[in-house]
Amino acid sequence: FQIPEVSFTPVSIEIDSESPSPGETVTITAKTPTFNKNSVMFNWIVDGKKRKDLSGLGKNNFTVTAGDVGSVINIRVTAQPLNGNQGNATATIRPADIILMWYAESFIPRWYKGKALPTQGSTVRVIAMPNFIINKTFIPPANLVYIWNVDTQLNVLSGQGERVLTHQLSNLTSAIHDIEVIVEDVQQRIKKKERISIQPFDRVTVFYGVSPLGGIETRRTANRFIKYTNELNDFEIEPFFFNVKSKNDLTYRWQIGNEQFNEPVERPSLITVNTRNSATGTVPLTVTVDDDNPSNPTLSKTLRLEIE
């Protein structure tokens, strides 16, 4: 006596995101490559409950909304062709979350409360902050596996705990860098992808007035027309987002009217203008800032002093 072979209908479950973000809409599709879906009866079971509202002839897909991180959605489907044997498949959806943070290693003044921005050729660090919870246990980021892709370069950095990517931007101001990270646990129960685009900003120089007692007047820039009486006046040029460690690493060339002079030695970004016994009128004060990188153009800034 020979037991006849039973050929089960091949069926698989395809999910557009097995590790969706909380609240994300997820589409689940049952694939039956050897049968037309319209000739197959699909019966769906979600979290142990038969879903008659989702089941029926040709009903091979539906959508669900992902819950919070740490929740689980268990899915099972049976596929019964009208002229074939039943097949089944299972899948699990585990919501997860990743936040990508970045900071640029470009210069900003110590008093500046804003973020250092990336510019041409600057170095940027991207940090992945995953939130993975499995069986009510938070998975430490150091225990996860990371794969980093930059633009068309795949796997530029990978390994367990490699959650920080260091990347140098292009010298082209129009270059946009697409950075992607794929994170998964060692058992590959959760696999989450996130990406970020980074584009270089322009470098900036800003004039500020300087008072003997208060120092740099950071609350107000001196960009246009400033009126000063006959006295000594100090001005500071502050560079932002240059690829240097200190603003003293930059070269400054000063000019008042048509007269050029060398930068001060001790504090090259500061200049003192003596308007005593000067004729009234408007005098341009110009400074050119250079980082000695041939790929970066010099920046010039002019402050027009109105002397009364």
Image (cartoon, helix red, strand yellow):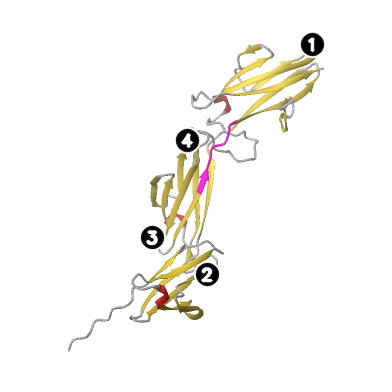
Q: Quadrant of the C terminus?
A: top right
- Are discs 2 and 1 less than 8 Å apart at CB? no
Q: State the residue at coordinates (46%, 73%).
A: 74
Asked whether residue 200 is drawn in magenta, I would say: yes
The three-letter code of the residue at mark 3 reads Val
Label 4: few (<14), some (14–19) or many (≥20) C-alpha neighbours in 10 Å: some
The three-letter code of the residue at mark 4 reads Ser
Q: Which stretch appears magenta?
A: 196-203
Q: Residue furthest bottom?
A: 1
- Cα separation, mark 3 vs mark 4, equals 34 Å
**Image: 55 above or below 70:** below
- Cα separation, mark 3 vs mark 2, equals 27 Å
Q: Which of the labelled discs sits on residue 279, or is there none?
A: 1
Q: Which of the labelled discs sits on residue 186, or is there none?
A: 3
Would you name the residue on which mark 2 appears? Answer: 64
- Cα separation, mark 1 vs mark 4, equals 48 Å
